[in-house]
Amino acid sequence: MRFIARFCKEKSEYFEIITIYDEHNEKEEISKEHPSIKTITIKNPAGIWFERKMHDDFGIIFEDAFDNRPLVHQERFPKDIHPLRKEFTQTKIEETPYLPYKYEEIDGDGVFQVAVGPIHAGIIEPGHFQFSQAGENMLHLEVRHFYTHKGIEKMLEGKRLEDAKPIVERISGNESIAYQICYRDIYLQATKQELPLSLQKRHALLLEIERTIHHLTDVGFIPNDAGFGSALSFASKLGEEARRKMKEVTGHRFGFGAVSFENSFIDIVAFNEWLNDLDKDIDFFEDWIMDIPSLWDRFDTTGILSLKQAVKYASVGVVARASGVKIDRRENPFYLKHGFSMANEESGDVGARFKVRLKELKNSIEMMRHFLEEDETVLEVAEICDGEYQSFCESSIGELFMSIDIKDGVIERFFARDPSFMNWQAVHIMMQKDIIADFPLINKSCDLSYAGNDL
Amino acid sequence: MIKFWNKRAKLGIITEKPELEERLKKIRKEIKKSVNKHFAGSLAIRMVDSGSCNACEAECNALSNPYYDLERLGIYFVASPRHADVMLLSGVMTFNMTPHVKEAYAQIPSPKWVISVGDCPMMQAPFERTYAINAPATEHLPIAHHIAGCPPSPLEIMEGLLEFLKKI
Ligand code: SF4
């Protein structure tokens, strides 16, 4: 039974704690006077961030949890406020005196701490990494995020679905299409409508363009972090071309606003030409890069996440598939019919994650060929009904989960679990046999989102 | 390896391919000239994300791809604010990032400028005010120039940098 998410909803008389597993959901009610509940983290360690977040957001106490430090609320955040409670309506808070955060640290003779971030050396999102080092060897890493926390869950409450969309598509820029598809599915559930096949194909096409752009960026940046810059030049050229394709098809380089209920014209001939060129370029790239021994010396056996650990930490997406976990939300009749095949590796190291991306790139090209269709279908949307809705989508990082409750026609509660939220919690395990110089490489090989994680 | 060299010879330098937009060619020349004039040939930028959606960062990263290749014009993204002339600021100034952004700004040696990139820092992106957002950035830092867009394309960022260079 795979753990997916755990979150809280405030009802008028009680808090409802919902735990999502792949096979079923669990709901528990707890009183508002004594909001306390048993932890699930003994069995599911990846539950800890969810529980710490719920403590910050709602003030819920988790009995026997192995960690009860704040997560989202950082050093200067006012104590004892719980912004996701309905009674909290402030749009401005004041900084309070600095209260140091107690990092997980290993002590000992000659062991020292290295603090990295929140602002990093490259053009990259903010986050903090705290290493306990014995010389070059990493003994422990604590990943600490939520610097980009914008309060989006709260921001969306009270909005109509249509009005919330521009915000939802900007939760994580690299996964915008995936967020839009999750959102689309909730919209359709709420209007009790089915999506015509042609629109389904168009959206799936967009999702694969997005995946192609993201994976191309990664297969360039990963070798670059091992000192092999020419791979980045080559792959980023292909990435730019894919981005221009996205612009041609959707009018926006990231596809913001692209998942709609109206199909528009697409130049199939030009699209196919691009796919053919890309196909050849990726073959060339693979042939070239697989043959650089010094690069594979860095990739192989670096940053291993074993199958057992990946399962224990409920990892998802590229990271999980590189460790031999066979999960992909695209494994369904629609995708299988259009040429989907799951990319898997066993070794769970940087090399495996790189290879999974290459395989997925090739598979995406094949699927895009099947999704291409000239079509101008329009779906008239019906009235939105109140209710509780959930959806999933496989973004370029991994499984994305979204839950929206609608009450009186507006959003009562919005919750999204980015794939990064799961995988960040497994990153510290990958470090345990490596040296600190490998950290950027390992981190890049996972390429997780900060914005989606922090929300 | 031989295949690689063959490919390289065939591909050439794509930044100099004539079919590339005229607009890009023109600004490239102008940027180079102004960087030479105002910054002795090298302008160092420290990019700081104060809570973006990452699309603005992706477009700044794209500035280094072979199509735009900003470094050839003397503009570098540097690893430390202490090496920087300019801070390029994206994002909505989250509550959690605000102190760190101000600290980074303090670390940049004078003379220094802040250029905001994307609609976020001006609170013009679709995000709305919550407890966790401190934007607009103008309330926290002196913004010398703003590059609008959600996100601005690499070309628009280059044009924005050029406008900034003309201003100072
Ligand atoms: S301006 Fe737009 S693209 Fe840039 S970070 Fe903000 S939301 Fe994302």
Image: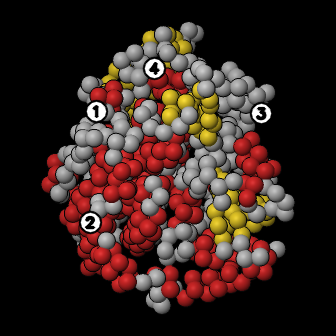
- Secondary structure type for disc 3: loop
- Dot 2 corresponds to which residue? A287
Q: CA distance from mark 3 to mark 4?
A: 30 Å
Quarter of the image for residue A142 reads: top right
First along the sequence among labels 2 and 3: 3
Tag shown at residue A16: 4
Residue A358, image x, y percentages = 30, 57
The amino acid type, in three-letter code, at marker 1 is Leu
Q: Nearer the viewer, mark 2 or mark 3?
A: 2
Q: Chain of mark 1?
A: A
Q: Residues within 10 Å of mark 2 (few under 14, many from 20)?
A: some
Q: CA distance from mark 1 to mark 4?
A: 33 Å
Position of residue A262 relative to residue A95, above or below, is: below
| Left or right: B142 in relation to B71 | right
Q: Say above or below: A429 vs A67.
A: below
The amino acid on which the numbered mark 2 sits, given as a three-letter code, is Asp
Q: Nearer the viewer, residue A236 or A8?
A: A236
Provide the chain ID for the residue under circle 3: A
Residue under the image location 30 percent in, 79 percent down:
A270
Q: Position of residue A29 (x, y in %)?
A: 44, 14
* Residue A106 tag number: none
Q: Name the residue that disc number 1 marks.
A: A307
